[in-house]
Amino acid sequence: MKSKSKSSPDSVETSEKTSIKAGAQIIVDTLIEQGVDTMFGYPGGVVLPFFDRLYDAPIRFIIPRHEQGGCHMADAYARASGKVGVVVATSGPGACNLTTGLATAMMDSVPVVALTGQVRTELIGNDAFQEADTTGITRPVTKYNCIVKDVKDLARIIKEAFYIASTGRPGPVLIDIPLDVQVARFRTAGSVEIELPGYRVRSKGHARQISAAAAAINESEQPVLYVGGGVISANATEEMRTFAQKAHLPVTTTLLGLGSYDQNRPESLDMLGMHGSAYANYAVQECDLLIAVGARFDDRVTGRVKDFAPHAKVIHIDIDPTSISKNVKVDIPVVGDAKHILVELIGQVEYRERQKWFEKIAEWKKKFPFSYDRGSVLPKPQYVIEELCRQTEGKAIITTGVGQNQMWAAQFYRYSRPRQLISSGGLGTMGYGLPAAIGAQVARPDDIVIDIDGDHSFNMTMTELRTAVENELPIKVCILNNGYMGMVRQWQELFYNKRYSKSYLSNPDYAVVAEALGAVGITVDKKAEVSGAIKKMLSQKRPCVVDFRIEREENVWPMVPAGKSLNEMDGLDVLESLA
Ligand SMILES: Cc1ncc(C[n+]2csc(CCOP(=O)(O)OP(=O)(O)O)c2C)c(N)n1
Ligand SMILES: [Mg+2]
């Protein structure tokens, strides 16, 4: 005899093995089965059945003030925790507002699952109220997306979404779920299996390629290890450290790779690329072997591609076969999981002194360190960041806006562990810093989370400050307020004859804005106040915003102008004079 105990209006137990559930309940149950205990999102008409099922679900739910913010929060939650970030939005405007967040996650290979509501299946294509072609709009900014047309497929498709988002080269996956699928009932019989016959993840690298790579490393006089964010997403930083130290390699990282190798170690060359260190850029241009791991030879890294690392044999270790030889011709590709491959390599590489090479690098380091005028009257942005690093002992999680602030945060904070810098690298999304700080603080409640932001980046999503206040997340925001879209102004200064066309906007009083939103607001306009303000900020239990009125026309050095090669850096004279 079937027992028909009613556990909730949307879920009916029919026997020990099967139960009849509404689609909305299936979504909640599948999320819980996937280990989701936290998610972000914003309601609307066609997701109400799902929101109703969330009412008493054991899932922490953070509501942003804009779906873009919610998507960045889920993305930063994923980057900070290593888990999949989950965001939900309604159809039409809600789904459209996710696109910037999805593109940000896509470019930086971040595992996010986005669930969107859709109008009833029979209305699709009718210009129904709040209908948008969500899968069409988001196809180019997701690793995978699909619409669920039948409730019987719902649990399997959501499970597949988590699998696709988090395996191989990670990325965002969007599942669009019409209203009628959320209310339709289906007899479920326990856990379902994923069915992805066309989706293969190669984890082990080819043994012969690994041996060829090891031989090239063992022969090399002047190698450089070039590390990207892929090493962090593969949780392979320990293996990376062992590998670099065993083979005795200088290590440079991309922006997203910062934290994969302790910058306090002597082998660290810091970041390379457009605003990377002179010593990393010179080393890459002069190396005889470039070992790229979990990096994709982005144009901000390579400068003029045809002259990138001109003397080097190139090894490229990456999970994504489509990245191989995409921008730069690779001599020894090794496709697979960085962790596996590095373990294999550790067994095959030998220690070499390479004294001359390390001496040459040490000279560049001495001649062109990252620097700035320490005698200035106004607060310098670099000083603010150095002071932040000092007072937090280099241990805070840093998020950033985009522009000069982001580059200074990369140059002047010292990162020593993975998942410590959370920044929009590939898309360069202004407005990412604040919601990212919220997502990171949710993931890492015991860490100090600081958003080093630009004034105009902050302007884009500052409404999310209230989300931090409401959820009692004690994030800190340091606005490097130069009044300008500083990076735009810098380009206009250097390449457009100082014609500062539309790169200046008036700003509100950020301390007052912060207080109005329920946070603590502090203003700093003298250099002498910087240290005390940071101390005060760090002691706050509430979210806190410090408006640093910095030197307005400060530039980021060095700079490889667009289209130039990595050794054609501007600003070296400035750095050399300050060294
Ligand atoms: C959403 C978005 N719009 C435009 C840009 C182009 N852009 C890059 S940096 C920048 C200026 C950033 O100004 P601010 O946040 O004040 O940072 P600063 O460079 O002054 O530190 C702009 C407009 C962008 N990256 N993102
Ligand atoms: Mg600015």
Image (cartoon, rainbow, N blue to C red):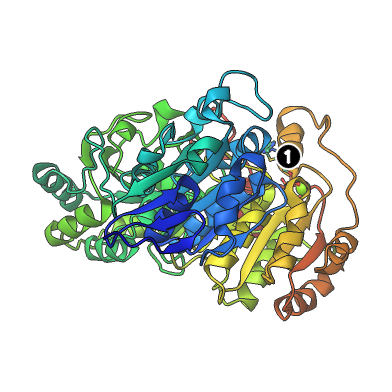
Residue 459 relative to residue 21: left or right: right
Q: Few, some or many C-alpha atoms within 10 Å of disc 1 (few <14, some 14-19, many ≥20)? A: many
Residue 535, given in percent of the width and then of the height, sits at: 73, 79
Q: State which quadrant residue 191 falls in.
A: bottom left
- Residue 43 sits above or below residue 15 on the image: above
Can you name the residue that lies furthest to the left here? 208
Say whether mark 1 is within 8 Å of ligand 1. Answer: yes
Helix, strand or loop for disc 1 = helix
Amino acid type at mark 1: Gln
Rendered residue at 78%/65% (across/down): 545
Screen quadrant of the C terminus = bottom right
Closest to the observer, 149 or 427: 149
The residue at the point 46 percent across, 69 percent down is 264
Q: Quadrant of the N terminus?
A: bottom left
Residue at the top extreme, as displayed: 126
Q: Position of residue 371 (x, y in %)?
A: 63, 59
Residue 24 visible? The answer is yes
Determine which residue is flagged by label 1: 490
Q: What residue occupies the far front of the structure in this picture?
A: 1
Please identify the quarter of the rendering in which residue 344 is found: bottom left
- Please provide percent x and percent y for residue 75: 53, 51
Residue 42's place in the image compared with 409, above or below, is: above
The residue lying toward the viewer, choosing from 51 and 465, is: 51
The answer to whether 75 appears left or right of 499 in the picture is left
Q: Nearer the viewer, residue 16 or 544?
A: 16
Tell how many labels. Answer: 1
Q: Is residue 564 visible?
A: no
Q: Could you say where residue 333 lies in the image, as x and y percent from the top left? A: 22, 38
| 541 and 262: which is toward the camera | 541
